[in-house]
Each structure stands twice: as structure tokens, then as C-alpha cells.
Image: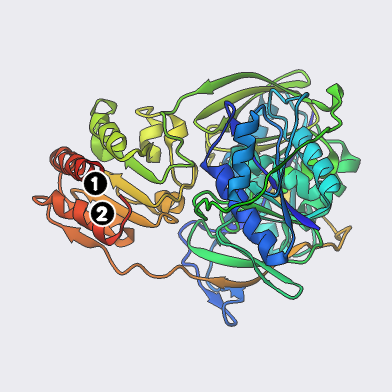
Amino acid sequence: MSVLVYVEATDGKFRKQAFEAVTYGAKVAALLGVQTHALCIDEVNDEELKSLSDYGANTVWFVKSQHLNFFDPLVIADVITQAESQTDSDVLVLVQNFDGRAVAPILAAKLKAGLVSGAVALPVIEGNSFLVKKNVFSGKAYAFYEMHSPKKIIALTSNTIAPEKTSSNVVLKEFHPKINERDFKLTVKEVVKTSGTVSLADAEIVVSGGRGLKGPENWGMIEEMAKILGAATACSRPVADVHWRPHSEHVGQTGLTVRPNLYIAIGISGAIQHLAGVNGSKVMVVINKDPEAPFFKAADYGIVGDAFEVVPKLNEELKKMKAGTTG
Amino acid sequence: MKLLVCISKTPDTTTRIAFTDNHTKFNADKVQYIINPYDEWYALVRAIELKEKNLARQITLINVGGSDNDAIIRKAFAIGGDDAVRIDAEPDDAYFVANEIANYARNEKYDIIFLGKETIDYNGSQVGGMVAGFLNTPFISLASKLELNGDSATIERDIAGGKEIIEVKTPFVVSCAKGMAEQRIPNMRGIMAARTKQIKVIPPSSKEKMTSVKYYELPVQKAGCKLVSSDHPEELVRLLHEEAKVI
């Protein structure tokens, strides 16, 4: 029995999500008193693979040949199933990102496993009871799921757990999945990237703009604030609908769900559909000229004022603070 | 081409969420139920558009739930869809629901199985992938565009920071997100036609459930919003740095 964590790399590097997932998996393994395996099938060098052990992976499985050069969730789920069998794992941990949302349920069907998608805490394990907490009703409540099946899959929400370094001896092992060319049933023709430098799903700070900004030409101050804070930029639905910003930046019920440490909403009224995508954020700040904007009821801090006056001043103050803390 | 559209019943978006029986049950009292918006606006409407373009012959709706779900099936009929199947069972576990849908679809040989990217109540995003897993057919998640050309489809799928353009042959399962289609309001002809369409009710074929909700919790109420004067943005910076410790 062991815990298997499936991680992805982007351009040969692991992102924070991967370290969070390994940290989470190692903590679950500690609760169960078992070993932690990590599996990566992307092309990654040994140094990068070893970095997974810093977060508690006892064995890191890698694939040397047969790197999958595009994403077919059916094939990935099949490879993970093979790794599950080789490592004798009962608990599988994935990241609830775009790819994880496709792979985890296929895996659940293949392994006859229970799945909790979007876990927001470590499981509570007592005797035969295995309880996992997740967001339900679009962030308006939590549910604690009892997992009855012997095999359990947890898809972890980003920013649930901070990556934590431990000392662990690393064992790198090559994994030889059986992949048939005819297993690939879909073809990726093209990948179009539209977003900025900081990945929205990973971001610890998100600066988001709404219709109150009046036009795409006014996003300079939003981007400046994001740059000062090392944040990702986001937007509300109406802004994406009129193409002021790309759809990939749209957070809310129909867009992306984010839960950063800090969410700064500028010129966003805070409709219930928008809040559904951001209300898992640890701290929310709202800047809006309308004191009746519903966002003030959900936020932790607020400034009632015109964004075009407040944001430039705020950016100057943030710069001063950053200069003070770093130098 | 035969299409299957999975529809789920969810509380209306504006529902006040409350629980009973010591936080173990959702309080359904006075709750207005709707078709899960992702299933309705994106999955169902795109299927209807394909039929209108003569690219599909038949649209079947499938739902897992009790007889009180017939109301939302009729609503879906008013928008479009030819016939419906209701698996008469409590849809309280995604694995169970997906297994039921897969067991039904396996014999009927649908070319495309449509559903929304997730339900707005349990936000699982599980049933589509599980159906594909059970049937061993390709799964395209979070699709924002779908064009058919014979038995081949070109699909745009949302990925981190962009999109991916995929080609796949039928049969496949697709989970639909914003962009796929636009919400339609049923017209009078549709509403009249919905009355006479057939809902076939069948008993569940399996029993296995993998998860159950033991209890619910409401988020801790925020202490309230601390307002800072617009003349003193430095005070906000101080609070975020020293009090909230997030910057």
C-alpha cells in the first residue's frame, strides 16, 4: 500500500502545483504510515525530478522514452493505472487543474475508485473512515465526503497546502508504460496561448479588473500592480465577453475558479456569479466607487473611490513598501 | 448521428444555501430547481444547433433522478430534444450516475455524449470523464467550440492560459463550457411540443456508490469589510502587509 502523486511539468519544470501535490501526498502517506511515490511522464531532467523528493516523495518514477507530446486524458489515465498497479497504491493524488479535471474521473472509472475533486484540506482518517473536504454550491458551502471504496482518488485544489520541504532520500526509477499508438484517439492540432507571465491558477496574488475600468486601454495600471506584486491578472465576465481581455483571464462561475492568498478586485461590483469563482481566496480587497457594490459585503478590505484615482496612488505606495521590504 | 445529452437538476444560482438534520442534509425547502446551466446553455443548445444544421438525426436526454425531475426534463424538451430517459434513482454519487449513463449509452451507440463542465451544486466535474472511462471513448473536457465534419469533430478546449484545438472521431464524450453556445428561451411551439414527448423511466442497473456526503459546513462569516479612506492608500498597504500578511 502506498500513495501515488501524479505531477505535470511545463517546459521541463515543475510548477508550484506539483510541489503542493507532492507535499499533500506525503502528508496523506504519513497519516497512513506508508510510502509516497511521485510519477511524471513529461520530459524532465534528473535534477528537476529529484526536487520532488524535497517535498516528501520517497520514489520518483519517470518515463525516458515515449514522452507523450500531447494530452489525451484516456492515455494518461491508462499510464497512471499501470503505475498504480506497479506501486501498489491505494490513494492517488492529482491536481484539480485543466488536465486533472479530465484525467481524474477517467481514472476513477478505470480503477473503480471514489473521487473527490477539488479537495481543500488534508483528509481526516480515523479507522476505516476517510473524509475529504471540498467546496460545494459554488463556494457557498463545504462538504465532507466519506470515501467508501478501497481505491481513493483526490484531485487537489491549488493553494490548499503550502509546499513544505522535508529531507527525504531520493530514489529515481524508470517507469515503462505500455502505450500503443492506436490508443491515441484524438489529435491536438494547435495550442494557442493568450495569457500573461504568471499563471492564474497558481498565482498567490491576483489583480482583477471589471467593467468599472471602462476600456481595455485602461489596463495598464492593473498590469502595473500585478507586476509590483508578482501577481497574475484576471477579469470579470463582462470584460471577457466584450474582448477587452482574453477569455483565459475570466474568473467566476462560468470561467476559472481561483483561490489565491490575495484577490484584489478593481471596478468589479461582485455579482454572485463572480464571487462563486473567487470566494475561496484567503483575503479579498475591493476598490469600487459604488459603496453599495455587493463586493463590499464579501471583501475583507475595501476602498470606496474612483479606481482611476485610487489605483495609481496605491501602486506608488505598494512600490514604496516593496522597496522597503526587499532593500 | 445520434446525440445523448446528460442533464442534471440543480438549485437555482441565487439559492440561499442551508442545511438540516445537524448539517447532514441540504435544506431543499422552498428551493427553486433548474436544469444545471452548463448542461442547458452549452451542452443541450449545441446539440440542438447540430440537429438544426442536419448534422444530427436524434437528440436523447438522459437524467438520473426521481419523478420530481420530470419538470426539468420537460423544460429541456421545450428547448429541444426528441426523447428522454430517466434512470429512477437518487443521483447522490458521481460514480453511480456515470455508471448508469454509461450502461444505458453502451447499448444505444450514441455518436456524441454531451454534458456541462460541472454542476453548480456539487461542482464535481466528474460524470463526463467517468462516462468516457466506462465506455473507453475519448473525452474532451472544458470544450468551448465544436464543429462537425462527417464523423470527425474539431473542438476547442480551454487549457491553462489559452486553448487547444483538437480533432477527434466519433464516438466521444464532451464536457461543455462557456463559448459552446448561447442560452435559448423556449418558445410557445417548443413548450406545447414538450408535453407530448416521451420520458422513458427505467430502474437503475447498478448499486455501487463510492462516496457519500457525511456532513456540510458553511464558511466562516467574514468579520466585515474594513474600509480605508481613498486618501490614504498607504493604510491599505500597511493592513495587507502587517495585519493580513499577504504582501
| Nearer-the-camera pick, B52 or A122 | A122
Quadrant of the frame with the C terminus of chain A: top left
| Nearer-the-camera pick, A46 or A293 | A46
On the image, numbered disc 2 is attached to which residue? B241
- At 85% from the left and 45% from the top, the residue drawn is A86
- At 25% from the left and 29% from the top, the residue drawn is A220
Percent across and percent down for residue A33 are 72, 65
Percent across and percent down for residue B224 are 28, 67
Could one spot residue B43 in this view of the protein? no
Alpha carbon distance from label 2 to label 1: 10 Å
Report helix, strand or loop for mark 1. helix
On the image, numbered disc 1 is attached to which residue? A325
Percent across and percent down for residue A218 are 23, 29
* In the depicted structure, whether residue A235 falls above or below residue A263: above
Percent across and percent down for residue B165 are 62, 22
Q: Using the image, name the chain to which the residue with label 1 belongs.
A: A
Query: Is B117 on the left or on the right of A307, as rendered?
Result: right
Disc 2 marks which amino acid?
A: His
Disc 1 marks which amino acid?
A: Thr
Report helix, strand or loop for mark 2. helix
Are circles 2 and 1 on residues that touch, CB within 8 Å?
A: yes
